[in-house]
Amino acid sequence: MKFELPNLPYEYNALEPHIDARTMEIHHSKHHNGYTNNLNNAIEGTNLEDLSIEEICKSPDLSGAARNNGGGYYNHCLFWSILSPNGGGNPTGKIAEAINKYFESYENFKNEFSSAAASQFGSGWAWLCVNKGALEVCATPNQDNPLMNNCGIPILGIDVWEHAYYLNYQNRRPDYIKAFFNLINWNEVNKRFEEAL
Ligand code: MN3
């Protein structure tokens, strides 16, 4: 399968002031585009070629360029989808109930997720996953994701590579993490949650 860079469902400047337009433009048109092209090159002529991106991530013999760029492709597709200029606020629907069940409150969830994102050393991601029906927070290095590590299906994720925030926030990763909560598209997270159950 030839993977294609998805269009963003909003303009590059739509997430300001939380994520600036220049960061979004470079992140999407350079970084995500690069992962997409490199993934296509890495899987060409291999047994991964005809698999879906989820199947590629779950493949037990995934390594090297296919792993880095397969993760990069999948992770950014998820990331753009769970952000929205109309996002933020408290979770709604089934995910709100599940967050209360597994984390006691949205505040507790925010603290746990923020702490996983802030303490990921170097580049990586923090995730909210559905693991055997339960909600869990975890973090992964580089472009790895929970599908690769068999620790659940990610339904929300934050990119903590410096390319995701450095222009606006420099070394202040915690400020970027705080701002991220103003952008979460809870409708999309709910959709992914119901599909993951
Ligand atoms: Mn990124």
Image (tube, rainbow, N blue to C red):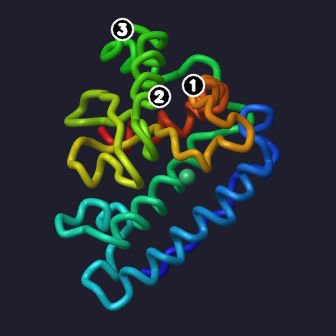
Mark 2 or 3 closer to N-term? 3
The amino acid at mark 1 is Pro
- Could you tell me residue 170's position as x and y percent? 67, 37
Q: In this view, does 160 lie above or below 48?
A: above
Report, in whole angstroms, how far the alpha carbon at label 2 lies from the one at label 3.
21 Å
Q: To which residue does mark 1 refer?
A: 174
Mark 1 or 3 closer to N-term? 3
Any atom of ligand 1 within 8 Å of the CB at mark 1? Answer: no
Quadrant in the rendering for residue 82: top right
Q: In this view, does 38 lie above or below 152?
A: below
From the image, state whether disc 1 or disc 3 is nearer to you. Answer: 1
- Could you tell me residue 61's position as x and y percent? 18, 69
Residue at position x 36%, y 8% from top? Answer: 104
The amino acid at mark 3 is Glu
Residue at position x 50%, y 75% from top? Answer: 3
Q: Nearer the viewer, residue 133 or 69?
A: 69
Q: What element carries label 3?
A: loop
Q: Which of 184 and 190 is in front in this view?
A: 184
Q: Quadrant of the image for the N terminus?
A: bottom left
Q: What element carries label 1?
A: helix
| Label 1 Cα neighbours within 10 Å, binned few <14 / some 14-19 / many ≥20 | some
The amino acid at mark 2 is Ala
| Label 2 Cα neighbours within 10 Å, binned few <14 / some 14-19 / many ≥20 | many
Can the viewer see residue 2? yes
From the image, state whether disc 2 or disc 3 is nearer to you. Answer: 2
Q: Quadrant of the image for the C terminus?
A: top left
Q: To which residue does mark 2 refer?
A: 118
Q: To which residue does mark 3 refer?
A: 104
